[in-house]
Image: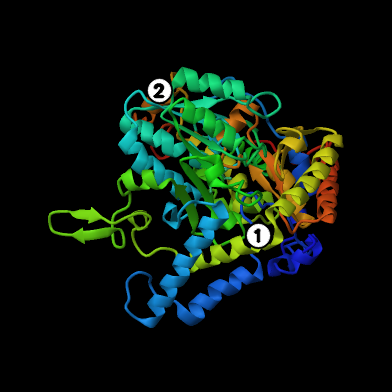
């Protein structure tokens, strides 16, 4: 199958629509959330129309069929990550829920007063706040790896921090959702393991764009979200090595995660069900599996190459525009994300103007306030690309940014003075 | 129909580029600051109230998008000379009307930031000077500022 974004667009019904201004949609907010192809929408509809019931509970046809589809989704996810066993795949509500599960369960069991959790300054709040909460609860510390001028982190800085802090856990993002920087999951994991730290990789921005092999990474925990891989909202994946899942205490208690319950207490069942208390996101798991198959059919290597080309084009053009400051490294070191600021123009005004041109970008701190603090910015605008974006859309984006500059440039405007009244 | 382009009407950009009373107010009696954590917009408002509970002078400072800054300028221009009661009666809807162009709910927050800060500034006397005010008003520091009903 040859890769043609124009053809792939036909798979995504939403891309045919226009925005409030009447312009056709150029959706460049994929790092926040992606769109869904028809096959994913259909898979979920099919579940609800033809065989939906609760899973693991009913002794009846629908429940058996739903359970089979739900468990098949787990196997699809296992293969997507190349995990050893489907029992290492826990369905959660998303990346945020996955990290919180590790913090509350593994963290409370393994981290104590004076221990260190090491993260990077480029983390999403989802990989910062749960550790702050753990620190409040058990008295550990959170240490941050700084980024250098070019928006990356040298291995030597990582090695030094591992040596200085001897962290219990090194939790880092595989791809920064602001800078687009790719961090080397495999080699950092190896370094961390050598110093005795466990590793959590936030793959929210990596899973949509690259082949992930969790055995090769060898990380202890890997998390990602369904809605960023063309799948549904409300579902995500927590991969953990089976030995951890077996040792970790259950986090949420309730139905589905127990072996027995008495008036005195309970015994938890085996992983992964142990971490799936309550009715799980059933149709969402089925939709997620369909999305993962879709990405594999298109080819994650193709997707990555295509995005890099778009990113390069956008990055280069932005750097030509006067007053534009592109954040993060040059395109060869990052995924399909370009964040930027404009001299004396707020990111919200950029995004608002781009919307009138049909171009959807994100503006704000992108849930990365500590990173924006060290960059000395209150907010930035971000264009993020995916398999269905085209060169034409990148050009429309650039043209609209050029308009922004003209629109908001100082022109010696004067406010109309109110008539003078004698107060 | 709301055309988003109209948000940046000339009148709005005029206020952005040539704001009314943007700067510090040295002898302020009341002041407060507010933020929109989502956007990073910041507005500080400083007021000088006279004994009759009238806003003698109003100034603002801040940083943020066109909407947050231009709306602050419009609001400050509007309230100078007004009584505290008049300002308290000035509703959020009236603020959006004063701004003019129709805003989506997300952007309304930017527009209402200065309105929110102004309302809280009325209750935030500046220490020292303000103590006298609070005492004069019957000493209710929690609500700060002179209580007009008691003073007039
Ligand atoms: C790097 C990173 N981590 C975590 C998250 C949080 O994902 P979710 O909101 O799906 O839980 C995001 C999403 O914005 C992200 O980009």
- The N terminus of chain A - image quarter: bottom right
Packing grade of label 2 (10 A; few <14, some 14-19, many >=20) is some
Name the quadrant containing residue A124: top right
Element type where label 2 sits in the image: helix
- The residue under the point 37% across, 27% down is A140
Observer-nearest of B118 and A324: A324
Residue A216 position in % (x across, y down):
56, 42
- The residue under the point 42% across, 35% down is A131
Observer-nearest of A99 and A221: A221
State the mark number for residue B131. 2
State the mark number for residue A127. none
Observer-nearest of A272 and A338: A272
State the mark number for residue A295. 1
- Subunit under mark 1: A
- Subunit under mark 2: B
- Asked if B137 appears above or below A91 in the picture, the reply is above
């Amino acid at each position: 199958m040859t890769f043609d974004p124009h053809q792939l667009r036909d798979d995504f019904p939403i891309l045919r629509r226009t925005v409030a201004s009447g312009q056709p949609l150029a959706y460049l907010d994929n790092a926040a959330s992606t769109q869904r192809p028809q096959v994913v929408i259909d898979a979920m509809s099919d579940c609800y129309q033809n065989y939906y019931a609760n899973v693991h509970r009913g002794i009846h046809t629908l429940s058996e069929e739903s359970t089979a589809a739900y468990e098949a989704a787990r196997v699809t996810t296992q293969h997507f990550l190349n995990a050893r066993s489907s029992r290492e795949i826990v369905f959660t509500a998303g990346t945020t829920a996955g990290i919180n599960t590790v913090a509350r369960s593994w963290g409370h069991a393994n981290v104590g007063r004076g221990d260190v959790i090491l993260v990077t300054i480029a983390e999403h709040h989802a990989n910062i706040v749960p550790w702050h909460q753990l620190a409040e609860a058990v008295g550990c510390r959170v240490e941050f790896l700084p980024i250098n001028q070019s928006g990356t982190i040298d291995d030597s800085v990582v090695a030094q921090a591992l040596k200085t802090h001897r962290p219990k856990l090194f939790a880092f993002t595989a791809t920064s959702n602001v800078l687009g920087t790719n961090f080397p999951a495999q080699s950092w994991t190896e370094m961390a393991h050598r110093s005795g730290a466990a590793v959590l990789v936030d793959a929210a921005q990596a899973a949509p764009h690259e082949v992930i092999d969790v055995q090769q990474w060898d990380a202890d925990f890997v998390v990602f979200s369904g809605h960023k891989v063309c799948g549904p909202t409300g579902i995500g994946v927590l991969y953990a090595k089976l030995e951890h899942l077996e040792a970790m205490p259950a986090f949420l208690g309730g139905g589905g995660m127990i072996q027995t319950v008495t008036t005195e207490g309970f015994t938890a069942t085996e992983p992964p069900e142990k971490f799936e208390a309550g009715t799980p996101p059933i149709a969402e798991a089925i939709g997620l599996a369909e999305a993962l198959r879709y990405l594999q059919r298109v080819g994650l290597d193709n997707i990555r190459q295509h995005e890099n080309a778009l990113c390069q084009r956008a990055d280069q053009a932005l750097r030509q525009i006067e007053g534009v400051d592109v954040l993060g490294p040059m395109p060869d070191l990052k995924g399909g994300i370009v964040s930027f600021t404009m001299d004396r123009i707020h990111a919200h005004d950029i995004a608002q103007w781009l919307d009138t041109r049909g171009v959807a970008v994100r503006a704000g701190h992108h849930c990365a306030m500590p990173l924006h603090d060290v960059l000395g910015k209150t907010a930035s605008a971000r264009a993020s690309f995916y398999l269905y974006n085209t060169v034409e859309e990148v050009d429309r984006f650039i043209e609209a940014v050029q308009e922004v500059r003209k629109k908001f440039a100082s022109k010696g405007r004067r406010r109309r003075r109110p008539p003078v009244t004698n107060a | 129909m709301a055309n988003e382009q109209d948000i940046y009407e000339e009148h709005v950009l005029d206020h952005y580029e040539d704001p009314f009373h943007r700067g510090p107010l040295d002898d302020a009696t009341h002041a407060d600051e507010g933020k929109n954590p989502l956007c990073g917009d910041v507005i500080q408002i400083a007021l000088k109230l006279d004994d009759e509970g009238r806003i003698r002078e109003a100034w603002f400072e801040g940083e943020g998008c066109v909407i947050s800054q231009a709306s602050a300028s419009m609001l400050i221009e509007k309230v100078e000379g007004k009584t505290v009661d008049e300002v308290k009666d000035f509703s959020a809807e009236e603020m959006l009307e004063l701004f003019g162009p129709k805003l989506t709910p997300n952007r309304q927050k930017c527009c209402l930031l200065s309105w929110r800060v102004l309302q809280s500034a009325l209750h935030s006397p500046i220490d020292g000077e303000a103590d006298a005010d609070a005492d004069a008003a019957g000493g209710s520091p929690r609500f700060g500022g002179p209580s007009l009903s008691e003073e007039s």
